[in-house]
Structure formats: structure tokens, C-alpha cells
Image (tube, rainbow, N blue to C red):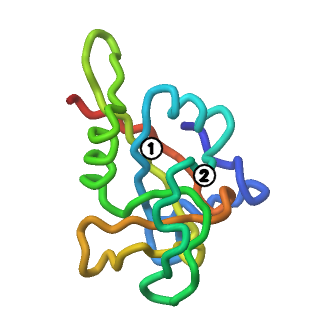
Amino acid sequence: VKVRGQFDGGDNSWMKMDDSGWVVAYHGTSQAGCWGILQGGMKPGSAQVYQTSKDVRTGQVIGNGIYCTPSLDVAISYARSRGSGATIAGNNVLIIMQCRVKPDAIKRCHDETTNAGAYWVINNASDIRPYGVLVKPM
């Protein structure tokens, strides 16, 4: 995914691997969902399970948004549970979007420091940026 220089007037500091960069998150999707994300960006889905819940750290209402997780395993499990597989070159695969998330935009459904199955919600699509497509054999 070509993202270098595409945001913030060409400033790529959001991709830094230190504490000044945005944090890595994952989003399990389907092949059709992947193409839609690559062409039009990420958008909130219809399943807003935690919409009325409160952020476990701030107590703010989570609201409507884009779901992601800091755990690759959780994203893989989500993609698998939704039957989100694809066939590429005759191989059945799962598709996971690798993203960067603006740290202060994260609404936490669970605390990732104590719950390996944590989900995050990002209310504003400009605060989550897909920058990689991960393809995992099923």
C-alpha cells in the first residue's frame, strides 16, 4: 500500500516506530472489503457492538466507529469467524489490514494490557490509516 507522503502534507512522522509515531493495529476483512478500503478508505461497519459502552480507561462513551485491535491473532480470529476468506492463486487465505492509529483517538473496549482479545474503536476515519495488506493461509 503506497502511503508515504500521502498524508499531513507529506509528513510521514505518523509511521515512525518510536513513541512519536501512531500505534499499529489490525483489521480483519474480506477480499471485497480490502478492495473497498484501498479505494475509499476505512468506514464504520454495521456491527457497532460497543457503541454504547464506555472506554475502559477514560469512561467516555465509545460511539460509532471503525473496529480494530492491537493483536494480529484477534484480527485473524475475527476474519476467520466471519468466513472472510479469499482465494488467491488457488489458495484459501485470510486478509488482514495493517494500520496505524492516532493514539489519542483510540476508544478502548478492553484494556489491551490485561486482555489479549482487546478491541479498539476509532471514531474518525482520518485517525486510522491502512498501510499494509497481510495475507495468511487458512
Q: Residues within 10 Å of mark 2 (few under 14, many from 20)?
A: some
- Assign a secondary structure to mark 1: strand
Say if 30 sits above or below 46 in the image. above
User: Dividing the image into 4 quarters, which one contains the N terminus?
Assistant: top right
Q: Nearer the viewer, residue 4 or 30?
A: 30
Q: Hey, which quadrant is residue 93 in on the image?
A: top left
Pinpoint residue 124: horizontal percent, then vertical percent: 67, 62
- Of residues 19 and 129, the one nearer the viewer is 129
Residue 138, x across and y down, in percent:
20, 29
- Looking at the image, the residue that sits furthest to the right is 9
Q: Quadrant of residue 95?
A: top left
CB of mark 1 within 8 Å of CB of mark 2? no
Say which residue appears at 57% left-offset and 64% top-offset: 122
Residue 44 circle label: 2
Find disc 1 in the rendering and name its residue.
97
**Amino acid type at mark 2:** Pro
Residue 89 found in image quarter: top left
Q: Nearer the viewer, mark 1 or mark 2?
A: 2
Q: How many marks?
A: 2
Q: Position of residue 59 (x, y in %)?
A: 51, 89
Residue 13 image offset from top left, x and y in percent? 61, 65
Q: Label 2, secondary structure: give it.
A: loop
Q: Residue at x 53, y 69 (%)?
A: 21
Residue drawn at the location 54% of the way across and 60% of the way down: 15
Residue 19, relative to residue 72: is it above or below? Answer: below
Picture layout, residue 122 above or below residue 75: below
Which sits in the foreground, 138 or 17? 138
Q: Residue at x 45, y 88 (%)?
A: 57
